[in-house]
Image (spheres, helix red, strand yellow):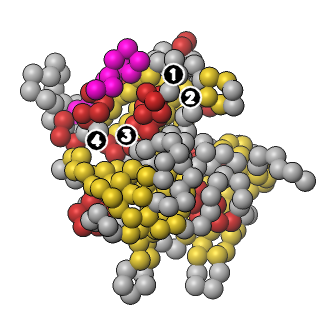
Amino acid sequence: MTSGWKVGTVSATRTETPTGRSITIDVPGWPGNIAGQHVDVRLTAPDGYQAVRSYSIASVGDDERVQLAVDRLPDGEVSPYLVDDLLPGDQLEFRGPLGGWFVWRPEVGDVVQTEPVQLIGGGSGIVPLIAMIRSHAASANPAKFRLLYSVRSPEDAFFADELASLAGDDLEITWVYTRKAPEGWPMPAHRLTKDQLASASFDVTQNPSVFVCGPTGFVESVASWLVDLGHDPARVKTERFGGA
Amino acid sequence: MVMHVDGNAVAGPLSEIFRADMTQASGECRHCHETTELARADVELDDVGFTLRCRSCTHVLFTVIHTNERTWVDLQGIAGLGLPPFER
């Protein structure tokens, strides 16, 4: 747990979707982070007005280089600046890493975490989940991972190329397209349903750890379906970022 | 604008008040006595501060309000907090 603010310098940005991008920042003194943690970002206007927002960290490990991914909220105060205006060399203030609850570690103490891991993300809710996927891929951890990722259209997926390259026996990915499906996709665009959640995710009998992140409404629906399907609420961890 | 989020989103400001990571702390609701991790609380957040509500009975657990002079912490709805053990 680290308190207080640090200054970081943007080293790179990358367009991920029509409304979002990833941002890589060098933060001297950053102690590294566990997959799933977040950071508070503080912006100060020339008149002294300050705004603070929380963003999940996409990167994982001991590095002083931190990657965030941000989606532009239509009436947002901070995200439009981060997505449209921020340039390499710009400085931001950071507090973190924060939160030790919505996290996944390959080992806890000396104990290798072997239970299956079910990740369920909506939109930019993928960000803490990709950190878990990266943490898993970088370790020799034998746990099976599944990702259920709901996006409006193929263009709206963050980290699409990386997810495609990591998909396989250790990471099964199910895509849900809510507005526009790719050409030739077997089903028309639709919102995630309880039946699809049940068929695409690890069964209760496999005792998975479940992580759900996305807009508040998406997380509420998925969390209540998971409990309906028999999952122990204590094994379902959720993170809501507001919005629609 | 008020954002409806959860206890994860206020880990930062809570880290300025408490030494422990409060997303992992458990909180007992004074009203219904449900005890869960604060990460699971229903949170209303804006630039003035935030309110944590019990997800089971919706009563307010606690409120944090920032003014220029002070940060005001009202713990009226919390019957108890469970934190990681520390050296006494």
Choose mark 1 or mark 3, whichever is in front.
1
Read off the residue under disc 3. Answer: A126
Residue at the image point whose x is 48% and y is 53% from the top = A64
Q: Mark 4: give few (<14), some (14-19) or many (20+) Cα within 10 Å.
A: many
Choose mark 2 or mark 3, whichever is in front.
2
The amino acid marked with disc number 1 is Ala
Read off the residue under disc 1. Answer: A140
Q: Secondary structure at mark 3?
A: helix
Q: Earlier in the sequence, mark 2 or mark 4?
A: 2
Dots 1, 2 in contact, CB < 8 A: yes
Image position of A185 (left or right of B63)? left
Total marks drawn? 4
The amino acid marked with disc number 3 is Ile
Are the residues under badges 1 and 3 in a single subunit?
Answer: yes
Choose mark 1 or mark 2, whichever is in front.
1
Dots 1, 3 in contact, CB < 8 A: no
Read off the residue under disc 2. Answer: A106
Q: Earlier in the sequence, mark 1 or mark 2?
A: 2
From the viewer's side, name the closer residue of A95 and A181.
A95
Does the magenta portion include A171?
A: yes
Residue A191: image location, x then y, percent: 27, 33
